[in-house]
Amino acid sequence: MAVLEVNFISEALMRTVPMYVILPVDKLPVPGAARQEVKPFKTLYLLHGILGNYTDWLYGTRIQRWAEEKNLAVVMPSGDNASYVDRAADHNYYGDFIGEELVEMTRKMFRLSFAREDTFIGGLSMGGYGALRNGLKFHNTFGYIAALSSAQPFDNINALTEDGMYFTQKRSFRQATFGDDLEAASKSSLNPRVLVEKLVESGNKFPDIYMACGQQDGLLESNRQFAKFLESYGIGVTYEEGPGGHEWDFWDRYIKRVLDWLPLDETAPGRNSGNVGLGLDINRG
C-alpha cells in the first residue's frame, strides 16, 4: 500500500496545501492468486473534522488497511476549521477546492476513475457537513456521500450566543465561517437542506447518501432529523446508529461500514507485514 504525502499550490486557496493519498498500486497478491488487473481507481475524498488536519483519518482509523483490501484510492486534504465552504474575504474558496480543484488535480496526478459512480466524498463532524454540502452542490462529480456524526451548523442558529459556550458554538465563529447574516446563509446553498430542495426541483440525479451517528453523540438528534428530512423528499438514505460518542472508536468502526456500503471491489487482502501469505509457519523457516 502506497501512502503519499503531497503538497501542491492551490489556486482556490492561493497557498501550498498538503494532503495524504492512499493508493493501492503496490498490492502484492497472495501465493496462488492472480495479479489483479490495473485499472483506474475508485476514489474516496475524505474530510476531517474541527481541530483536525489531513493526517487525522490515517492515524485515527484503519482506513489504510481497508482501502488496500478494496482497491480504493483515498484522498485526505486539510480543511482548517473552515467547514469546507467558500470565504471570499480571505480567499479561502474551500468549496471550490474540494468539489473541483482537488478532484481535477488528483486525477492529473494519479490513475483515478473519472466516472461519477466511482467518485465518493465522505467526512466526520465538520467534514460530514462538508461532505453533504459539497457532495450535493457538486452532484455531477460525486455519486456517493458518506457523513459520519455530521455537524448541522444551521440548526438552532437563533439560540447562538457568546457566553459560556465552546468556540464552535459561538455566534461570532459561525458568522466568521458563514457570513454575518446567518439567517440569510441558512437560506442559501451553504445549507444542505436548500441544496436538497433545489435538486428535487430541478430533477437532477441525487448522490446516494449514507449517514451514521453515535447514540451518545450530542449531534445525534440533528443527524436523525436530517435523515428524516431526506426521507420526506423521497430520497433514499442509509441511516445507522450505534453505541459511541463523538470520538475515533465510533468513526473507526463506521468508516468500515461506509466502505462496505460503497460499490467497491470484493475484499482481497494483499501480502504485507500483517499478512505474509506464505501458507506455512514462518517461525520454522
Image: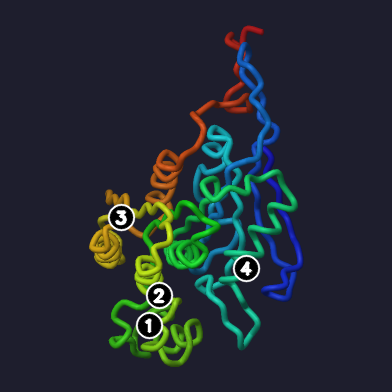
Judging from the image, what secondary structure is the residue with disc 4 in?
Answer: helix
Circles 2 and 1: CB distance less than 8 Å? yes
Q: Closer to us: mark 4 or mark 1?
A: 1
When the figure is inspected, residue 55 is found, relative to residue 179, above or below; the finding is: above
Judging from the image, what secondary structure is the residue with disc 1 in?
Answer: loop
Dot label at residue 187: 1
Q: Closer to us: mark 3 or mark 1?
A: 1
Dot label at residue 214: 3
Coordinates of residue 234 in the picture (x, y in percent):
26, 58
Q: Mark 4 or mark 1: which comes first in sequence?
A: 4
Q: CA distance from mark 3 to mark 4?
A: 29 Å
Judged left or right of residue 197, residue 25 is right
Q: CA distance from mark 2 to mark 1?
A: 7 Å
When the figure is inspected, residue 36 is found, relative to residue 256, above or below; the finding is: above
Q: Residue at x 43, y 42 (%)?
A: 256
Q: CA distance from mark 3 to mark 2?
A: 23 Å
Tell me the crowding category of disc 1: few under 14, some 14 to 19, or many 20 or more residues within 10 angstroms, Cα based: some
Residue 220, quarter of the rendered image: bottom left
Depth check, front residue: 165 or 226: 226
Q: Mark 4 or mark 2: which comes first in sequence?
A: 4
Judging from the image, what secondary structure is the residue with disc 2 in?
Answer: loop
Q: CA distance from mark 4 to mark 1?
A: 22 Å
Circles 3 and 4: CB distance less than 8 Å? no
* Amino acid on which disc 2 is placed: Asn
Circles 4 and 2: CB distance less than 8 Å? no
